[in-house]
Every structure is written in C-alpha cells, then in structure tokens.
Amino acid sequence: MLKKISTIDAVFIVLMATCGLVLKPIIGPLTKLIGSALFLSSGSFAGMIYYIFPMLALLVVRQFGSATLTGLIQGIIILVTGIYGSHGILSLITYVVPCLFIDLAYVTIRKSNREWLIFFPGAMGNLSGNFIVAVLFLHLPMIPLIITLIISFVFGGVSGYISLNMYKWLINMFPILNKSV
C-alpha cells in the first residue's frame, strides 16, 4: 500500500475523494437522463466521470494504493453520512474494489512509455464497479450484463484519457504536484 506520503499528497487524496462525492448528486441524474435517451447503462456512463478522481490521485501521488485510499475515504464518508449513492455497508465494497482495480491495472502499465495505455486502469475501474453493482444490486441477466460491461470498459477508458489530460494540466498549473522533477 502507501509507504510514506507527504502532507500535500494526503491533502490531494482527500480532495480527490471529496470532489468525487460532491459531483455524484449532480452527475447521477444527468447520466440517467443521457443514458435513458441513448439506451445506455447510466452507471457505465457515470463511471467515466466518477473514476477521474481516483485516477488523478494515483497519477499525482504516484504510489500504489492512492486510488484505493481515495475509494476508501469515499466509502467511509458515504457509509457514515448516508448521502447520495449509499448502498449501506456494501458501499465500502462498491467504492474500494474499483479503485483497487485502478491501482492494480496501473501497476501493469506504469513502466511503459506508451500514453495510450492509461486507458486500461480507468477501464478496469469502471468495469469492476459496474460489475459489482450489476451483480449485487441489479441482478442483470447475462446479455444485458455483457453489454453493460463492454460499455463500461470503453467509458472507463475514456476516463483514463481525461484523467491523464487533467493531470498534465494540473502539473503545468501547480508544479509542486510534479513528482518527475
């Protein structure tokens, strides 16, 4: 997990967890509206936005476990407050596991110089999150489940690209966040 992180990294992780939670009540209804109009799973589409924040935490902090810690903070806040998006005690699973998949997928690509591989961690986070919700809560039949997972993989990959571009903008605007210097 996380070795030793600086105060600014810890603050950034908490900030990313908070940003994800603040946007959830806004993004949720919008994605339901867009998803129903396009006959897409709204969770697959919403994950494109939700998983930007754990990805950003991972890209900025650059330590395995950063995304997972972001998801854990979100899960605990959701559990304690019962705000929008709560699944009770299962919130810990629905928030932590996808972020763990982001961390695990990033470990497999971090040494590569190919930027397009950033698609993979975002895709795995969104895919695993939608799989958990589809199986635990929605009980989707096989064909709709497969379609949902394909859509969530693609939208999650887009989330990876958005995260990378936001990361580049952040380190350009706030050089203190750049670990490669």
Image (cartoon, rainbow, N blue to C red):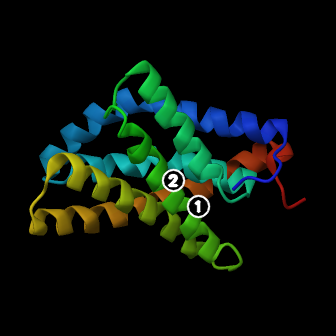
Residue depicted at 73% across the width and 58% down the height: 62
The disc labelled 1 sits on which kind of residue?
Answer: Asp
Residue 20 visible to an observer of this rendering = no
Quadrant where the C terminus lies?
A: bottom right
Q: Residue 90 at what x, y percent from top left?
A: 35, 40
Locate residue 12 relative to residue 54 in the image: left or right. Answer: right
Quadrant where the N terminus lies?
A: bottom right
Locate residue 168 relative to residue 75 in the image: left or right. Answer: right
Total numbered labels placed on residues in the image:
2
Locate residue 171 relative to residue 45 in the image: left or right. Answer: right
Q: Residue 81 at what x, y percent from top left?
A: 43, 19
146 shown above or below 6: below
Q: Residues within 10 Å of mark 1 (few under 14, many from 20)?
A: many
Residue 51 visible to an observer of this rendering = yes
Q: Residue 141 at what x, y percent from top left?
A: 9, 62
The residue tagged 2 is 99
181 shown above or below 37: below
* Label 1–label 2 contact, CB within 8 A: yes
Q: Give SS at disc 2.
A: helix
Q: Residue 97 at what x, y percent from top left?
A: 45, 53
Q: Residues within 10 Å of mark 2 (few under 14, many from 20)?
A: many
The disc labelled 2 sits on which kind of residue?
Answer: Cys
Residue depicted at 86% across the width and 44% down the height: 176
Residue depicted at 70% across the width and 38% down the height: 12
The residue tagged 1 is 103
